[in-house]
Amino acid sequence: MAPIMQEAPEFRFDAASVLSLGRRDHQEDALATDFPIGADFGFAVLADGMGGHAAGDVASKIVVTEVFSELMFQSSDVDAMTSDIGEVLRNAAYAANECVRAHTESNPETDGMGSTLLAPVISNGKLYWISVGDSPLLLFRDGKLEQLNEDHSMAPQIDLMVAAGALTEDAAANHPDRNALTSVLFGDEIEAIDCRDDPFLLADGDVLIAASDGLQFLDDREIVAILKGNLAKPAATIARQLLDALENLDDPAQDNVSFAVIKVQTMVVDALSQLAAELVRASSDNSVDEPAAESLEDPEPVEYTPAKLAVRAAP
């Protein structure tokens, strides 16, 4: 008896991104994403700058440019890249940090500038990431929201003081050092890096949000409500709803906000049909002076978002 061809899930992504000024007078966030149509590989790079108008925006742009460029270069061979993804991501962060150092040495007036870094990489349903600072990588699954990456700020330590009874919740929420960063890319030694060497396995229906801390002006309950109410809708709708909720707060302290919403979807494709489709495409590519063969009918379509840099939203 001939072996039965197993059905294999294919992962696809619907992604949308937002970059907003908030209530600030200049933009210190930077964001770039690449999720090609129909591909099972993609990534985002986000940075939240610090150091004021003359430096924070420069630092975040340096970090995003360097890391995004390196990941684009490495992604020419996805298998090789993901087989050593931890080293690839760490080397990209070190290179970006070195570029920040070189810039401050050449431009002393920018001394002290720095940036967070958050770069999730997804390949065939496997999630990897690197993060430095307090930009959160959020996972919404089965109605629950959790932060996957480490928070390199004083907030976790302050929350531990609440758990130990040393601080009240109100005092912790308003602590002046709560948002102080404990690790950042600023051209010197990087105090802490959260880098995923082993994959976190994604599932159909997962929603990822890679964000700057400006998104956290919304509390988790508000984010969950938006996600629950829009799960069947495109990522662009979810992104718009999140941005609208921030704007509706009308908080005069609203920070710059940038985020990428990534919906994970699977398609089960019969392996034999998939092989036949690939043979048809190969035959079509190699044909000479013949009409192109019709491709086999695809499974139920899924909406995708083209690869792009961040979509800028009106402040």
Image: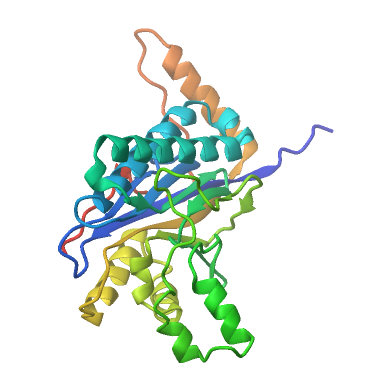
Q: Residue at x 57, y 43 (%)?
A: 124
Tell whether 127 sits left or right of 308: right
**Image location of residue 283, percent across then percent down:** 48, 17
Circle count: 0
Residue displayed at 62% across by 85% down: 163
- Quadrant where the N terminus is found in the figure: top right
Residue closest to the eye, 56 or 46 = 56
Picture coordinates of residue 212, whole percent (x, y): 37, 61
Chosen colour scheme: rainbow
Residue placed most toward the observer, 177 or 31 = 177
Please name whichever residue, 251 or 309, is drawn nearer the observer in this view of the structure: 251
Q: Decide if residue 117 is in sight here.
A: yes
Please state the horizontal and vertical placement of residue 89, each as a whole percent of the image: 52, 40
The residue at the point 66 percent across, 47 percent down is 198
Residue at image point 59% right, 28% down: 80
Indicate the quadrant containing the C terminus: top left, top right, bottom left or bottom right: bottom left
Res. 297 in view: no
Q: Judge by depth and name the residue closer to the eye, 53 or 48.
A: 53
Q: Is residue 226 left or right of residue 52?
A: right
Left or right position of 227 against 81: left
Residue at the right extreme of this rendering? 1
> Up-down: is 189 above or below 280?
below
Q: Could you say where residue 256 lies in the image, as x and y percent from the top left? A: 26, 64
Above/below status of 24 relative to 59: below
* Picture layout, residue 81 above or below residue 166: above
